[in-house]
Image: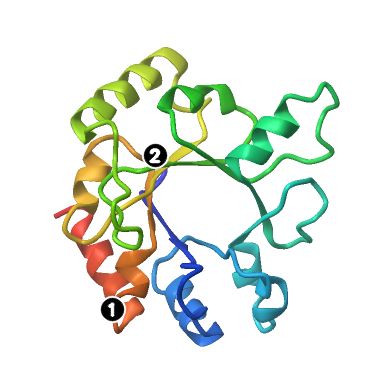
Amino acid sequence: MTTFQLIGIADENRQRPSESTLLALLSGGLDYFYDRSAAAETSLKSSTNARSRTLLAAPNPGEVRAPFRWHLKEADRMRLFGNEEPLSEKPFSTSIHQLNDWPTLAGQVELVFYSPIFPSISKPGYGPSVQLDRLAQQIKLIREQHGHRALPRLIGLGGISANNVRLVHQAGFDGAALMGALWQSPNPVAALQQIRASIYT
């Protein structure tokens, strides 16, 4: 069984974290980092491992150079997946806002971000339309219908912190994406350790 994964997401409204902070997060338990900065490809110069664990968004295949991972935003996925032409490469991850879209992406991507789970920490006023207990029921049903191995890993996003990450795990998600919980902390590395310690306790 795959361990519960933690993915950091850059906050476009805040200063980009330093390379040393990112490396400390990745060595301290962050599995991936989704960097939405335009300077992302040139910023991680010292570590091939860090680049291979960094997701970059692009609207078309081939625009994200290896070893970075290609994240396909939902609107771009609708456009590309609606074409009859097969993609020259598969995106590593994408985003959804309807849980029913998750099984349709089996074999297409590795990670699927579903949001929002809780009221957002970084976007006041943005919150869930479906309660977590209902999501847990839907996740269980979809897994029973489609089998665990066929589905992309499901990553919860939105308002996740040390106070509620355990609930996300218990609801059946394969991981959690973190934004406000990291970047609104004076010490993102310490915040990550607290979140990791809270998953199973």
How many tags in the picture? 2
Question: Residue type at mark 2?
Answer: Met
Which quadrant, please, contains the N terminus?
top left
**Above/below status of 105 relative to 178:** above
The spot of residue 76 in percent (x, y) is 68, 40
Q: Residue at the location (50% across, 28% down)? A: 151
The spot of residue 96 in percent (x, y) is 49, 36
Residue hosting label 1:
190
Camera-side residue: 47 or 161?
A: 161
Which quadrant, please, contains the C terminus?
bottom left
Residue furthest to the top: 145
**Above/below status of 114 relative to 178:** above
Residue furthest to the front: 125
Q: Are marks 2 and 1 in contact (CB under 8 Å)?
A: no
**Above/below status of 37 relative to 21:** above
**Above/below status of 154 relative to 49:** above
Residue 137 image label:
none
Q: Residues within 10 Å of mark 1 (few under 14, many from 20)?
A: some
Left or right placement of residue 169 versus residue 41 in this view: left
Left or right placement of residue 165 versus residue 157 in this view: left
Residue hosting label 2:
1
Q: Residue at the location (53% across, 25% down)? A: 150
Q: Secondary structure at mark 1?
A: helix
Give the mark nearer the N terminus: 2 vs 1.
2
- Hey, which quadrant is residue 181 in on the image? bottom left
Left or right placement of residue 80 versus residue 31 in this view: right
Question: Residue type at mark 1?
Answer: Ala
The spot of residue 116 in percent (x, y) is 35, 43
Colouring method of the image: rainbow
Camera-side residue: 24 or 185?
A: 185
Label 2 to label 1, Cα distance in Å?
27 Å
Camera-side residue: 123 or 181?
A: 123
